[in-house]
Amino acid sequence: MKKKTISELRDAQVLIVVDDEDNFIEYASRRICHQGQGLRHRAVALFIYNSGEDILLQKRKNELFNGLWDLAGATHPLHRGDVDESYLQSALRCSKDEWGVAWQLNRVLSFTYFAPDGQYCENEYCVLFAAKHDDKLAPNSDHIYEFKWIVWAELQSELKREPERFTPWLKVAVDLINHRVLNGGDQIHQSLSQLTSLQDSSGET
């Protein structure tokens, strides 16, 4: 039997549709959730940093927002059979699938956003998880073109200079961290380790 491609596996996924407060509405296919104006659905993103307070970015390999610089990972909690994957479970799956690492993830922020990409879109209630990583990395080429570590000030500069090179949810997450953690400063005046103690009060993991 021919092995299914990553794209085919994604198309078969069933996502969890919610309102702006993360209240369950229904289940829908991944394709329906992303067509046209889409359906608001649950998502996660990974914010990974090292001891030098560099931020891990990946160049995204995906049908949506392909080739843009993204946070370390992004995916959706899935509905499988009669079980809903939790935000944390989906974030851990993402970290293992894309990097082969089971990070100690902490839920720190949540936000909603809408972003079109041609005839498709992202329309998400997104939960951001953070973790620290200082070891070597082996990215999965099925998901990632390339990766880099970038200092916070340089990331801020690149976002201002060439925002079109970055995914929409990265921009929202960086802005929230900048204002909630770093108090609007362009430089990191306080350690990013604060993220491990910052608790998102919007829901369960």
Image (spheres, rainbow, N blue to C red):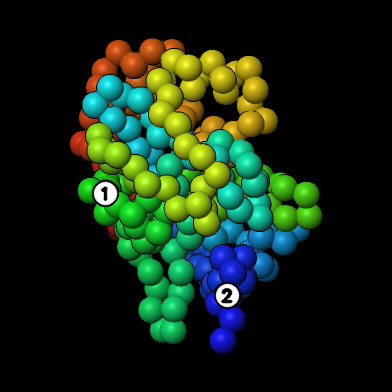
Please say if 162 is above or below 75.
above
- Which residue occupies 43% across, 42% down? 72
Residue 141, horizontal then vertical, whole percent: 50, 52
Q: Is residue 161 above or below residue 57?
A: above
From the top left corner, tell me how far across and down residue 50 is, in percent.
28, 30
Mark sitting on residue 4? 2
Taking 118 as reference, is 173 above or below it?
above
Quadrant (top left, top right, bottom left, bottom right) of the N terminus: bottom right
Q: Secondary structure at mark 2?
A: loop
Residue drawn at x 35%, y 20% as measured from the top left: 182
- Left or right of 198? Residue 65 is right
Residue 141 against residue 72 in the figure, above or below: below
Q: Residue furthest right?
A: 119
Residue at (30% x, 52% y) in the render: 101
> Residue 137 or 34: which is nearer the viewer?
137
Residue type at mark 2: give it: Lys
Which residue is the site of mark 1? Answer: 103
Task: Report crowding for label 1: few under 14, some 14 to 19, many 20 or more residues within 10 A (C-alpha).
Answer: some
- The part of the image, by quadrant, that contains residue 84 is bottom left
